[in-house]
Image: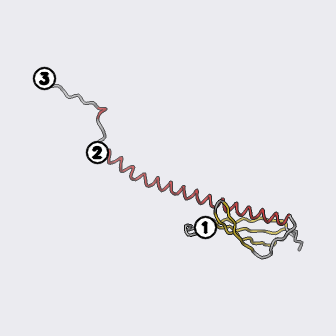
Amino acid sequence: MIRRARQTNDSAQGFTLVEVMVAMAVVAVAMPALLFALVQQLDGTAYLRERTLASWVAANKLSELELVLASGGELPREPFEGESTLAGRDWRWRVNRQPTQLPGFTRVTIAVEAKLDATDESSAQHRLSAFVVTGDQR
């Protein structure tokens, strides 16, 4: 009796159970780390967007103040505040005026924060300082 040796086809063999379990363990460890990094990136992007919008509100307010001064108007001596809307969002701003040692120049500081509603937990803040020519001669 002649026995024939079984021919095995190496390419038809699959992964062993141990190899599959190790691969699943690696994926199970790596996936939460990747998701955590993705969530941090999204939070960072939203934060930067809010800060950028707040800086635009401050720049807009400074431009308004410069137009008032250019048209011959004056800035109030006391701090004043108000609200603006930009990009579908409400913003609160506050303007403080401080004298400088140079006659005719005033330091203006504009603080901006996002107006909070029930869904917001934090407020984007931005502070802009500028020196404007007021024409005050002290």
Comes first in the chain, label 2 or label 1:
2
Amino acid type of the residue that numbered disc 3 sits on in the rendered structure? Ile
- Counting from the top left corner in percent of width and height, residue 99 is at 81, 72
Work out whether residue 3 or residue 54 is closer to the camera in this orientation and state it: 54
Give the quadrant of residue 62.
bottom right
Quadrant of the snapshot with the C terminus: bottom right
Comes first in the chain, label 3 or label 2:
3
Q: Is residue 57 left or right of residue 123?
A: right
- Residue neighbourhood size for the residue with mark 1, other residues' Cα within 10 Å, grouped as few (<14), some (14–19), many (≥20): some
Q: Nearer the viewer, mark 2 or mark 1?
A: 1
Label 1 sits on a secondary structure element that is: loop
- Counting from the top left corner in percent of width and height, residue 61 is at 75, 64
Q: Residue 39 has which mark?
A: none
- Counting from the top left corner in percent of width and height, residue 81 is at 72, 72
Label 2 sits on a secondary structure element that is: helix
- Judging by the rendered image, the residue that carries numbered circle 1 is 123
Amino acid type of the residue that numbered disc 1 sits on in the rendered structure? Ser
Most extreme residue toward the top is 2
Separation (CA) of disc 2 from disc 1? 52 Å
- Judging by the rendered image, the residue that carries numbered circle 3 is 2
Q: Is residue 4 left or right of residue 120?
A: left
- Judging by the rendered image, the residue that carries numbered circle 2 is 17
Label 3 sits on a secondary structure element that is: loop
Q: Residue at x 13, y 23 (%)?
A: 2
Most extreme residue toward the left is 1
Quadrant of the snapshot with the N terminus: top left
Separation (CA) of disc 3 from disc 2? 35 Å
Q: Residue at x 45, y 54 (%)?
A: 33
